[in-house]
Image (cartoon, grey):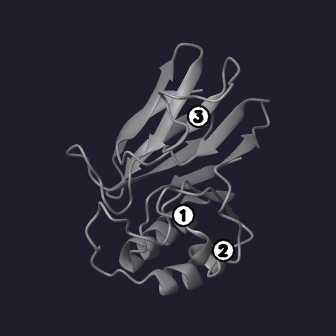
Amino acid sequence: MKLFIASDLHGCLPTTLETITKYRESGADHLILLGDILNHGPRNPVPDGYQPAQVAELLNEYKDQIIAVRGNCDSEVDQMLLDFPMMMDASWIILESGQRIFLTHGHLYNSDNRPMLRSGDIIAHGHTHLPVAEKDGEQFIFNPGSVTFPKGGFVRSYGLLEDNQLKVVAFTGETLKSVMI
């Protein structure tokens, strides 16, 4: 199973179009959205191309391929525009190997405040807009960075899980971070 993981779209239509293009080119089975889908939030500037209703329309075309969780900028009003559920604070994916991925945005659970995880489990979250792919003790931490508002000197990025490797990929195609799981 191949997964495409994106976070922090923040209602930016040009970025969402690019993200969907990268998703389709990747051949991934599912598009995982780690929150902050439609709203830019009070601490971020309004992104160029801010068109949350159009972002929702575009994402709805992939509703049967999306697994999404709620970010701190997402609301019930946002959910009214989306044809896939995104109001859960967390979700799980169980890989064919039996390994589990805990999906969350990062404002409640994150690498410093983990839920009950087993050895080999992965916590995947956004929120910080900083890419991470690493083993921490007996678990893995993954953050695809942000497709709209990268921070910490990083570029816009997304994540891929393929062939037991989690990697953060820049929109230019360069691998920024990776870890074998």
Q: Which residue is mark 2?
A: 62
Q: Considering only order in the chain, which callout, 2 or 3, is on the residue closer to the N terminus?
A: 2
Towards the viewer: 60 or 82: 82
Query: Number of marks in the image?
Result: 3
Q: Which residue is mark 1?
A: 23
Residue 78 is labelled as none
Crowd band around label 3 with a 10 angstrom C-alpha radius: few (<14), some (14–19), many (20+) = many
133 to 73, vertically: above or below: above
159 to 78, vertically: above or below: above
User: Nearer the viewer's eye, disc 2 or disc 1?
Assistant: 2
Q: Considering only order in the chain, which callout, 1 or 2, is on the residue closer to the N terminus?
A: 1
Label 1 to label 3: alpha-carbon separation: 21 Å
Q: Quadrant of the C terminus?
A: top right
Q: Quarter-wise, where is residue 16 in the image?
A: bottom left
Q: Which residue is mark 3?
A: 123
Q: Secondary structure at mark 1?
A: helix
